[in-house]
Image: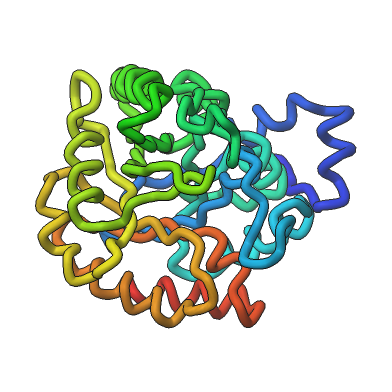
């Protein structure tokens, strides 16, 4: 029997008095295949807070209000064509208790230790879901972030741990989405390189991680010049989803970039977070529906 869904007001009480309710809700959740009849994926990303990344645009703490974030997520997940959500354990468990993950794809975020702005940001420890956690809770996939700076030794530790995590996920027969970037520091801040050569290289490196790529997907950004994407995506035969990233004001321009890249044969969908949960006009449902329409 499926336990009744909680309300936002119930969450703290349930967590304080009935922590076992999380496992019960996970066990009772109605599951679906990762890829449905449309063979496309529309995933809402909400794993930014666990890495201390709370800003959207000029609002430094846009993602800091958990109750507001959950309301936006529940609205986004209720829209037709939205397949699921990517988040860290705390957010996914809130959504489980709220009953928002029935018949949805649930992707757990695995390495959140590279806190935004930290000196050790590229030594991105796996402080989130482990493969065994995802398997035990009946979640559908995991996601790992792989940022590589040739001048930062911390990248090698992340690269090595990522490879072993790919192996562990394959042992559980769980898909893992790898989000690779080449990056560098400028003025003390980490910058990602979205030029075609850098994105091509990051895809090649990510595709070769681990002892098998059978369960590996890629989560890739659109290049600085969208016309380069057809050539860039030929670097791998692995299925890929587009990373939405933060869109600074020009959401219509982002839609057009995504629309073009979604026509490519290896691209199977979109994973978008802040730009849909906090669109410039405040219309979450409208932004999500437009993104779904691109598929």
- Picture layout, residue 218 above or below residue 27: below
Numbered-mark total = 0
Q: 55 or 99, which lies in front?
A: 55
Q: Is residue 280 left or right of residue 203?
A: right
| Picture residue at 47% right of the left edge, 25% below the top | 123
Q: 67 or 96, which lies in front?
A: 67
- Residue lying farthest front? 187
Image x and y of residue 180, in percent: 33, 41
Image x and y of residue 119, in percent: 56, 30
Q: 67 or 158, which lies in front?
A: 158
| Picture residue at 62% right of the left edge, 47% below the top | 53
- Picture layout, residue 156 above or below residue 143: above
Q: 121 or 25, which lies in front?
A: 121
Q: Quadrant of the C terminus?
A: bottom left
Q: Quadrant of the N terminus?
A: top right
Q: Tell me, what colour scheme is on the image?
A: rainbow
Image x and y of residue 247, in percent: 49, 68
Q: Quadrant of residue 174?
A: top left
Task: Say if residue 97 shows up in the picture.
Answer: yes
Q: Is residue 138 left or right of residue 151?
A: right
Q: Quadrant of residue 179?
A: top left
Q: Is residue 225 left or right of residue 284?
A: left
| Picture residue at 24% right of the left edge, 67% below the top | 261
Task: Say if residue 169 shows up in the picture.
Answer: no
| Picture residue at 10% right of the left edge, 53% below the top | 234
- Picture layout, residue 27 above or below residue 97: above
Image x and y of residue 89, in percent: 61, 34
């Amino acid at each position: 029997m499926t336990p009744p869904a909680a309300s936002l007001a119930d969450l703290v009480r349930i967590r304080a008095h009935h922590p076992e309710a999380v496992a019960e809700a996970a066990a009772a959740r109605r599951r679906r295949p990762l890829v449905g009849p449309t063979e496309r994926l529309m995933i809402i990303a909400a794993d930014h807070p666990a890495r201390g990344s709370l800003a959207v645009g000029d609002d430094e703490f846009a993602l800091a209000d958990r109750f507001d974030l959950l309301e936006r997520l529940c609205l986004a997940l209720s829209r037709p064509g939205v397949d699921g959500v990517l988040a860290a354990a705390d957010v996914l468990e809130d959504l489980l208790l709220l009953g928002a993950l029935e018949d949805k794809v649930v992707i757990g975020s695995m390495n959140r230790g590279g806190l935004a702005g930290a000196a050790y940001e590229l030594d991105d420890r796996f402080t989130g879901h482990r493969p065994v956690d995802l398997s035990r809770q009946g979640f559908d996939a995991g996601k790992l972030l792989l940022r590589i700076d040739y001048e930062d030794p911390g990248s090698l530790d992340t690269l090595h741990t990522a490879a072993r995590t790919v192996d562990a996920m394959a042992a559980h027969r769980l898909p893992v989405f790898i989000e690779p970037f080449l990056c560098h520091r400028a003025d003390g801040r980490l910058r990602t390189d979205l030029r075609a050569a850098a994105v091509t290289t990051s895809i090649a490196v990510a595709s070769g991680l681990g002892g098998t790529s059978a369960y590996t997907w890629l989560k890739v950004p659109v290049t600085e010049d969208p016309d380069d994407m057809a050539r860039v995506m030929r670097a791998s035969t692995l299925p890929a989803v587009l990373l939405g990233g933060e869109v600074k004001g020009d959401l219509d321009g982002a839609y057009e970039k995504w629309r073009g890249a979604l026509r490519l044969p290896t691209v199977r969908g979109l994973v978008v977070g802040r730009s849909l949960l906090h669109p410039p006009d405040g219309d979450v449902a409208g932004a999500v529906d437009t993104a779904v329409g691109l598929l």
